[in-house]
Structures are given as structure tokens and as C-alpha cells.
Image (cartoon, grey):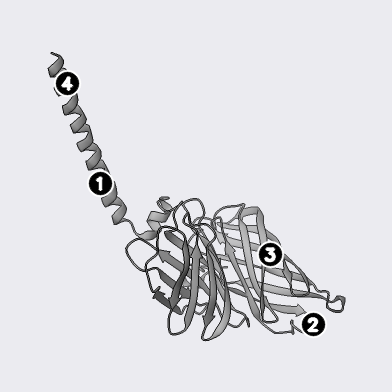
Amino acid sequence: MKKLFTLMSLSLLLFSCSQDSEVSDMNVDEQNAMNLDEQVAAGMFDNSNLGIYEGVFTTLDGQNQATIRIEMDSKNNPLVMFVFPEGDMKSFRSNSKAAKNQINNLHFESDSFEFDFDVNDDGSNPVVSNITYMEKKGDVIIFKETSKSAVSPRTGTYSCIDCGTHPDLGVGKTQTFNAVLRDGVGSPESNWDFQFTLGSKVYLGTGAQSGCETAFGLTTCDVIGEGQGGSGPFYINGSHTYYSADAVSSCSRIEGNILYDSYFNNLDAELSFKTNGPTGEGNNCP
């Protein structure tokens, strides 16, 4: 009887292992059937350096802007895509595959772009450095997408409303004002990161989204932020508007005014900014 019980236990154990193997194989097949965006949304790369990184790029002179997206999986050399405001896209792959440990100086190079990419083994602290576009130096801010944080980059510009005689802010002079939403378009309380150029230098700022109100299918949120310019602080006062029903792929824009409290001859300058974003079908963003 004892031998029979032992044999039955072994049989059950083998059957259980067989079932576990089948489930494991099925999960792998299902995972392989997913595209990279679906894998990221499912949390498969939340604690890995593999996955998707998104952000914004500008040349230091403020004349060229683009969103940047880096895709890294275990099968192919990492892919980068730059999308310009006019819709033009440049994509190419790095010189080598991504390691699963900390990445240092992963090199990307094409006929127009060149840069290095660093990131920790868990996907934290991604950095794009030494970037040039058409031999012009540039700057990138970039963040990793996870299942809990959908990164949404925006290219944009600012121009002066009242700039007086400030040497870096001539009336009608348009420069970069890019923005990255790090908590998803449809999240009422989200954080913004800003990237702007001034006098051939790049400065960064941050902002918080709050006070969202919805009416007639549109949600409008206040965006309050600040940053440090070359000769004083920026104070950012804007709004984010998006279609409530389809926040990811439909209309989404941020716009507003900036007060530049410049130390240059105690001159305060007022600026206006607007970012590009998804505009819905037929560019019907209101």
C-alpha cells in the first residue's frame, strides 16, 4: 500500500511538472506574440533596461526639435526614431546589441545623427550624451516607459510677447520649448518636464498638472511650473487640453505664458509657448 501511495505521488508530481511546463510554454508564446508596446504595458520590462525610452531633442541654437524614442529588446540592435514637428522621421539602429546589465556608451550613428546612450541595469537614469544633428550640438531629456508610467513627449516653441532689449529674447525670435508628460495623458495629477533654449544654451524646468475639469468631452488642466534661464528664473503658467475619451492618441496640447524674471537690467520678459501633440483625425484639435 505504501509503495502504491508513493507511485501515485510521483505520478501526480510528474503530471504537475508537465502542466507547469505547458503553462510556461504557453506564456512564452503569448509573450512572443506581443509587440514591444504591449510587453511594456504588461510590465515585462519594468525592472529591466530593455523596453522603450521616450523624450525630446533640440539643437542648442533652438532651430531643430524632435521627439526621440529608443526601443531595446533582447533580439535586435536597439532602434532609435526621431520624429520632427513636420512629421519627418529618421530611424536607425545602434552599432551593437544591448546588454542586460548596466549600459555605458551604447553608440548610435547615422548620416545626420550621432549620440551615446547610458542606462542602469534596472532601466533607471537613462542618459543621451554627445548628441549632434547635422554637426550641430544638441540636448536630450529622456525617460523610460513602464506599465505604471506612460511617457508622452511634445515638441514645441516659444516666442516673445514683450521682450524689450533683452539680448537673447528678441521680439519674434522663436526658440525651443519642449515638454514631456511622465504620468500619462489621462492622469489628472501628472508631472511635466520642460526643455528650452536661450542664448545657445539649454535649460530645464518642471511643472505640475492639477485642477482638471471636463466638459463636452474635453478635459482642461492647469499646468504650473518653473525653470532657470541664463539670467533668471522662468515662471510657467499654462494649460493642458485633451479629449477625455481617447487621451492617448487623440487631441492633446499644452500652451500658455511664461514670465522670465531676468536679472539683465532688471528686465522682465513675457513669452508665449505652445507644444505640438496628437491632434486627432484631420487635425481637429480645438
Q: Kindly report the distance in space between the C-alpha atoms of the residues bearing marks 1 and 2.
A: 64 Å
Q: Amino acid at mark 3?
A: Gly
SS type, badge 1:
helix
How crowded is the residue under tag 4: few (<14 C-alpha within 10 Å), some, or many (20+)? few
The residue wearing badge 3 is: 238
Q: Is residue 186 left or right of residue 43?
A: right
Tell me: residue 11, above or below residue 80. Answer: above
The residue wearing badge 1 is: 26
Q: In the image, what residue occupies the spot 58% across and 66% down?
A: 253
Label of residue 166 in the image: 2
Q: Kindly report the distance in space between the C-alpha atoms of the residues bearing marks 4 and 3.
A: 72 Å
Q: Kindly report the distance in space between the C-alpha atoms of the residues bearing marks 3 and 1.
A: 48 Å
Instruction: Please report contact status of discs 3 and 1: CB closer than 8 Å, yes or no.
Output: no
Q: Amino acid at mark 2?
A: His
Which residue in the rendered view is the most extreme toward the right? 266
Label of residue 6 in the image: 4
Q: Quadrant of the N terminus?
A: top left
- Residue placed most toward the observer, 197 or 250: 197
